[in-house]
Image (tube, rainbow, N blue to C red):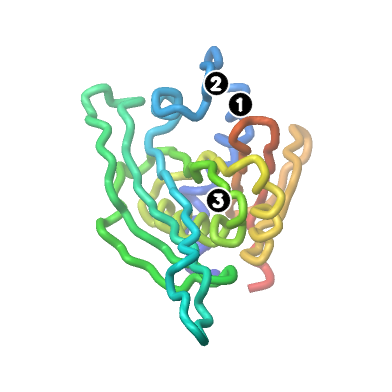
Amino acid sequence: MSRARLSFLATPLFSALFALMFFVTALPARPQNLFDKGSLEQRFDFIITVQTQVLKGYMSYQGSTLNPITQLTITYQETPRLNQSRVSKTVQYEDLWYHNCHAIGCRRYNVFQIEPGEQGAIRFVPSADASNSGCAIANATTRLLLDIGLNKSSLAAVFVPADAVGEVTTQFEQFNFHPFTPQPDHGIKAAMALFICSEPEGTKQYMYYDGSNL
């Protein structure tokens, strides 16, 4: 991902910093489960959902250098949060394949097309495979972040399995995202910011993008 393309995202995505800093405090009375469909639809204009599966038997033959392969299946939907007449329809977006932290394949089914200016979330559905796929989660998030920015929308939160937060945070650093702690009296210069939240709740991590060394 080039510096020029990331700079293009700065204006629409910088607003995400303000959204994520007040993400928790701005919520209304907390629902019982923050991650069920109804709760997510109340808080976000669009939701990107990612299912993770390790294809252990795929490409498994003598001499193969591509086993195991991790497949990420990605769908998205716009919610009726601010438009009650909108029908919340799930769109099959793309499949991504990874091996040893490297993206090796992509199959796109539909265009990523949501209303410009909307604010959404990416949810990596918890599973044993997702918990062991920190590299793939970080890489896929940066790709989806680009799609969101090109659509002139913003990303408010990334939900990942609780036991994967540490690995995901570490892997984000290879894309020049660095951890930070928001402070009311201390700003930070950054084109983009990410809010990573564990599912179930308990761990959160803020990260900012630094493209100065690209």
Query: Which badge, 2 or 3, is on the more N-terminal residue?
Result: 2
What amino acid type is highlighted by mark number 3? Ala
Secondary structure of residue under mark 3: helix
Image position of 125 with respect to 103: above or below: above
- Alpha-carbon span between mark 3 and mark 1: 24 Å
Label 2 – label 3 distance at C-alpha: 27 Å
Residue occupying the far bottom of the picture: 63
Q: Comparing marks 2 and 3, which lies closer to the viewer?
A: 3
At mark 2, the secondary structure is: loop
Verify CB contact (< 8 Å) between mark 1 and mark 2: yes
Please state the horizontal and vertical placement of residue 96, each as a whole percent of the image: 42, 63
Q: Residue at x 42, y 44 (%)?
A: 49
Q: Amino acid at mark 2?
A: Leu
> Residue sitting at 71 percent across and 47 percent down?
188
Question: Residue 24 got which mark?
Answer: 1
- Identified at 77% across, 40% down, the residue is 186
Residue under label 3: 130
Instruction: Categorize mark 3 by other alpha carbons within 10 Å: few (<14), some (14-19), many (20+).
Output: many
Q: Which residue is mark 2?
A: 27
